[in-house]
Image (tube, coloured by chain):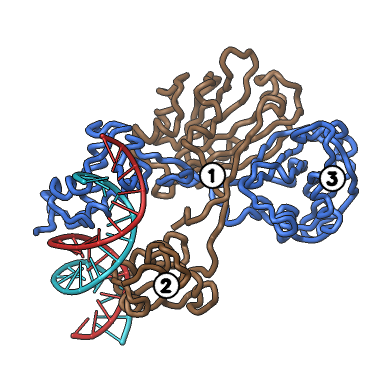
Chain colours: A brown, B blue, C red, D cyan
Amino acid sequence: MDRTSVFGERRPRYQIVAENLLAAIQQGSYPVGSALPTEQELCAQFNVSRHTVREAVRLIEQMGLVSRHQGIGTKVERDKVDQHYVQTLANISDLWQYVNETHRTVLDIRDVTAKQVEVPLPGDREAPWRMLEGLRYVRNEAEPIAWTQIFLPKAYGAVLDEAGNERALIYSLVEKKFGVVTRSVRQEISAVEISKPVAAALKVRARSPGLAMLRQYVSNSGEIFELTWSIHPADRYRYSMEMVRSYGTARD
Amino acid sequence: MDRTSVFGERRPRYQIVAENLLAAIQQGSYPVGSALPTEQELCAQFNVSRHTVREAVRLIEQMGLVSRHQGIGTKVERDKVDQHYVQTLANISDLWQYVNETHRTVLDIRDVTAKQVEVPLPGDREAPWRMLEGLRYVRNEAEPIAWTQIFLPKAYGAVLDEAGNERALIYSLVEKKFGVVTRSVRQEISAVEISKPVAAALKVRARSPGLAMLRQYVSNSGEIFELTWSIHPADRYRYSMEMVRSYGTARD
DNA sequence: TAGTGGTCTAGACCACTGG
DNA sequence: CAGTGGTCTAGACCACTAA
């Protein structure tokens, strides 16, 4: 069979098939929610082998437009390419943009319940958590860049006592010791007025502005297995990120 | 051929082949930079068809471990799975988590140069920019949630005058009117002490803490074609995000 | 049970790269 | 030129779903 299209192009057939399907979907020939023709029908329609059809459908599937279901068929999920932005972090460690350049000191380690702290701990207000309170410094700077509280469910609490001034991130220690797998990290950034005791530890003026970060580490089972609350003096910390336009589905 | 493995599993062969290759790469059998065996060799080695081998290689390619090059071969690029977190935004509009629930009012529109403002405008300090200064409100609330400055290179400045109180995001208007394509958005978050004039506009106490966001919109040609600087009262705004662990390369 | 997508084989030709 | 990955066919059986 001649592989040149009507335009004299010489491109893979599966790509041509994919483009045809794409156009058909975008034109509404196959509305969202409806089923795409079966692979066999597409074979006949485009006069190509099933392998080629599957390759074409794979393409538009990867664009997030359709989903395939064994025994059922191929369903149209969207009618336009889901162009979205993603923030990429080569590693979760990038959360601390310079984690390797900083170290932590410990002010206190103790057991607490939600009632005793201002940080919103999830679940039962009486549930026991183990808390580490500390400061984070950059290299040999005299002034800390953050005042931090780290909360672990009591069951994992031992990690905090063992971690001490270690470099490693707590969440990775929990992963290793208890076999927890981190599914996602939720982060919330806000501005605060730094309270007197925290200001003293950070060596800044009381009531001066600070950047507060709340992080919740969620395991594969949906449990929040670590929670951190950090306060940074306004002039010692900025949070920056870059979002790049990309195609495809980061969700499916 | 029996499709059950030694463990009695019943899984696709290409998956088993992929896992074997994965393990071999991670163990250093195929060092980074070296070539994977050719597809034909892998066919013989695993006693499967070429289609199956290609499917297996496709998997580890999608994990970012190898790259394929027609006429050359398959090259090992990494020896560990690049597990990273991505922040997903269904749309750049999500930057304003409630852009559709807010509206903007205009305080002023005028021409400025980098010298005249505190916001770091890139390029020549004498270069002309057009600036819109305004407030952003949620629904019918009396108090604004943000004081904002939007800067466009003078050449695009007309967009600001035409936009007025329109709902649309400025960047999308620039895209439409001038054919600019947004490649990425850089964002920087910091805490600030709200200055007297801004505090008055926001109806908060002078010197109270605020969340400042600097956004730079970068075009496909690398030009920063829009820059915004927003200040939010601490108690009226939080920036939240979720990062999900994922596999594959968002960069390639 | 009929029909879907998922997997797999055997074999072929093509496009591209390097020597 | 020989050898690589890229594309494609024809045909087969399997796993799953719904009627």
**Is residue A119 or residue A245 the one in the foreground?**
A245
Type of the residue with mark 1: Arg
Which numbered circle lies on residue B162?
Answer: none
Q: Are marks 1 and 2 on the same chain?
A: yes
Q: Are marks 3 and 1 on the same chain?
A: no
- B32 to the left or right of B14: right
Q: Can you tell which of label 3 and label 1 is closer to the viewer?
A: 3
Q: Position of residue A213 (x, y in %)?
A: 61, 36
Which residue is painted at 52% across and 38% down in the image?
A227
Mark 2 residue type:
Lys
User: Same chain, marks 3 and 2?
Assistant: no
Residue that badge 2 annotates: A75
Residue A157 at what x, y percent from top left? 42, 31
Q: Chain of mark 2?
A: A
In this rendering, position of residue B104 left or right of residue A120 = right
Write down the residue under mark 1: A186
- The x and y percentages for residue A252 are 44, 58
Give the class, few, some or many, for how many residues have Cα within 10 Å of label 2's Cα (few <14, many ≥20): many
**Which dot marks residue B131?**
3
How far is mark 3 from mark 2, CA to CA? 47 Å
Q: Position of residue B69 (x, y in %)?
A: 34, 45
Image vertical order of residue D16 relative to residue A146, above or below? below
Residue A140 versus residue B120 in the image, above or below: above
Residue at coordinates 86% horizontally, 55% vertically from top-left?
B161
The amino acid pointed to by label 3 is Met
Could you classify mark 3 by the number of other residues whose Cα lies within 10 Å: few (under 14), some (14-19), or many (20 or more)? many
